[in-house]
Image (cartoon, helix red, strand yellow):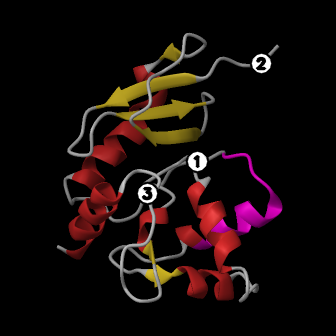
Amino acid sequence: MTATLLYDVVPSPLGDLLLTSDGERLTGLIFDEAPTDEMERDRAALKRSVDQLKAYLAGELTEFDLGLEQPGTEFQQRVWAELMAIPYGETISYAELAHRIGQPKASRAVGCANGRNRIAIVVPCHRVIAADGTLGGYGGELWRKEWLLNLERR
């Protein structure tokens, strides 16, 4: 039997954000997605995540302190761990991210792993940009990426 996935929805300048949890760790922070019938709303279980997210969006928090759980391949886990090491307010290129994980020719694979990140904002995939300085892609739409980067530049 699978454990029930807990959720809460947070209205934000980026639209409604769906947060999910296994009861102990944050398992998702997703743009524009509605909870499913299999999920159970539990504001108490997600209070710490919601409080930190709201503080971040208000410009009052620069580093999250949350337990995270996100299934993925070993390669994806390495990419996501390296995303967490990008300091608040800084950006790096996909090529630089590939270099940092020891696979300098894997820029495209890094981009794919970045796109599979299900814990947006907290695992800051928005901090990765194209080598020419343009925003590149973003699963949450480019206007959100730009908004997040502008927030962190303030």
Q: Which residues are magenta?
A: 70-82
How many numbered callouts?
3
* Residue 33 image label: none
Considering depth in this image, is 153 or 55 the residue closer to the camera?
153
Q: Earlier in the sequence, mark 1 or mark 2?
A: 2
Q: Give the quadrant of residue 142.
A: bottom left
Relative vertical location of residue 116 with respect to residue 17 in this rendering, above or below:
below
Q: Nearer the viewer, mark 1 or mark 2?
A: 2
Relative vertical location of residue 46 with respect to residue 4 in this rendering, above or below:
below
Report the amino acid beneath label 2: Thr
- Residue 86: give x, y in percent of width and height: 49, 76
Q: Is residue 24 magenta?
A: no
Question: Which residue in the protein does label 2 denote?
Answer: 2
Which is the main secondary structure of the residues drawn in magenta?
helix
- Compared across the picture, whether 81 is left or right of 18 comes to right
Report the amino acid beneath label 1: Gly
Calculate the distance from the C-alpha at mark 3 to the C-alpha at mark 1.
Answer: 9 Å
Under circle 2, the secondary element is loop
Q: Residue at x 55, y 10 (%)?
A: 37
Under circle 1, the secondary element is loop
Question: Which residue in the protein does label 1 denote?
Answer: 67
Q: Residue at x 36, y 38 (%)?
A: 50
Q: Is residue 34 visible?
A: yes
Report the amino acid beneath label 3: Phe
